[in-house]
Image: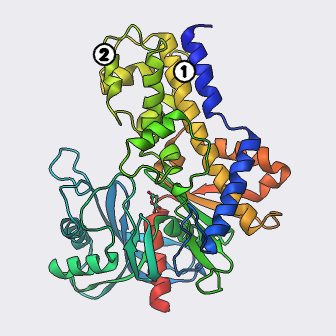
Amino acid sequence: MSNLLEALEQVKKQLALTPEELQRISKRFRQAMADGLSGKPSSLKMLPSYLGQPSGTETGRFLALDFGGTNVRVLLTELAGDGSISVLQRASKPLKNPAGAYDYTSKEADGLQLFDFIASIIKEVVPPEGTYPLGHTFSYPINQTGLNSGTLIYWTKEIETRNVAGQEITQLLQEALIRNGLPQVQPQVILNDTVGTLLTAAYKDQTVDIGSICGTGHNTAYLEETAPQTNKPMIINMESGNFDQLPFTAYDDLLDSHSDIPGNGRLEKMVSGRYIGEVLRLILWDLLGKGLLTNSPDKEKLNTPYCLGGEDTAVFAGDTTAEHSTITHWLESKLGIHGAQPEDVQVIHSCAQLVAVRSARLVAATYLGIFEHIDPELKKPHTIAIDGSVYEKMPGFPEAMDTAFAQVLGLKAKQVSTVLSKDGSGLGAAIATAIAVKN
Ligand code: BGC
């Protein structure tokens, strides 16, 4: 075996997770849930949403604002009361202009500018007449004190916009709406994207009791039967991307040490679209010293942090052809790396697959931890609604989760399933608004 293939075997050993390891992670996760719920120190924040499951009969016309890691989307929606939602109008803009005209995620921008930008997108959608209740999906950890109030604990996904952390988010939005001449827009509720995803899928299917995002960021919410705040059923935003009792590799530690907030978001940094390309790059950079790309004069280009993203990882993992010509082409056109040999592209493909499968299995282990908490015997069927580019576009991702469930649960795995809830995070804001208005 060549040195390079031997090095690949070492990487495999580090990234592979046996069924026993998955079980160990799920048990630690379950314990962290219990600790977080009872107020003990835990990497899981277990934040209240003040929302329960929808009945599916909610009706009305609502604005939904979806503020995620990459785009701001605004939808004018109509809930029909029969599980269906129609989108009447929509507008969307990236938080960071691809041509460099603006970047509301950087240190140069502040909260006022960011929320004025959001208000300008709402303006594109909202009619001048009438009043419009709005639900706000805000995909970051907030200390929620009620349906419509919460302060940002800290930014995640490497966002650095000034003067937002520690602030009351609904107030920032409300002030921006007034500044921008939009008094007819009335924020009613703020929710996490995982909560929105759960609500959207549960609006149609009552077996959905877990909502999750596997996209730029990662997190999961679930329906807690007896929430500590109310002793009633409530959806809890776990901020599970912050879970930290995991088998870290040297690559994970290196990535973490160079990130905005070292020590935070350790699971997210192993599994989400914002980071997996960087995990892959660190592995490939290490393999350069062990024979990868020796005939490529431009291989040093791999020394640029974050030059590989989640999309590149998906392309590399998905090129299963014998020649891996897509990988060769991608290396040349996107990264300017020429001269890759058949063994190089084979190794790059394998590493991308290992990173992708590890991501799916780690996330699956956290879902297993939730089942242990809500229904250890799996007496009922449970559907996990998932939104996000990694679940949707990473080749083999849902299948790798199913394999993990089957390995740990055996025959009982038939009680659990995952389903794509496309745009569920944003649409959920409309459902949450319907619930809030009714209350
Ligand atoms: C945030 C979560 C969010 C997740 C998915 C994480 O970085 O902390 O609040 O749900 O990304 O968008």
Furthest residue toward bottom = 439
Kindly identify the residue that appears in the image at 42 percent across and 38 percent down.
311
Q: Is residue 277 visible?
A: no
Secondary structure type for disc 1:
loop
| Depth order, front residue of 10/400 | 10
N-term mark: 1 or 2: 2
Please state which amino acid type lies under the numbered disc 1: Thr
Q: Quadrant of the N terminus?
A: top right
Q: Which numbered disc covers residue 171?
A: none
Using the image, determine if residue 388 lies above or below residue 84: above
Instruction: Please name the residue that numbered disc 2 is placed on.
Output: 298
| Depth order, front residue of 196/106 | 106
Q: Quadrant of ligand 1?
A: bottom left
Please state which amino acid type lies under the numbered disc 2: Asp
Disc 1 residue: CB within 8 Å of ligand 1: no
Q: Quadrant of residue 116?
A: bottom left
| Depth order, front residue of 125/116 | 116
Mark 1 or 2, which is nearer the eye?
Answer: 2
Q: Which numbered disc covers residue 321?
A: 1
Q: Quadrant of residue 172?
A: bottom left
Secondary structure type for disc 2:
loop
Kindly identify the residue that appears in the image at 60 percent across and 87 percent down.
230
Q: Is residue 357 visible?
A: yes
* Colour scheme in use: rainbow
Q: x%, y% of residue 333?
A: 31, 24
The crowd level at tag 1 (other Cα within 10 Å; few <14, some 14-19, many 20+) is few
Q: x%, y% of residue 98?
A: 23, 45
Using the image, determine if residue 334 lies above or below residue 204: above
Q: x%, y% of residue 143?
A: 44, 74
| Depth order, front residue of 37/400 | 37
Q: Is residue 62 left or right of residue 390?
A: left
Kindly identify the residue that appears in the image at 43 percent across and 50 percent down.
216
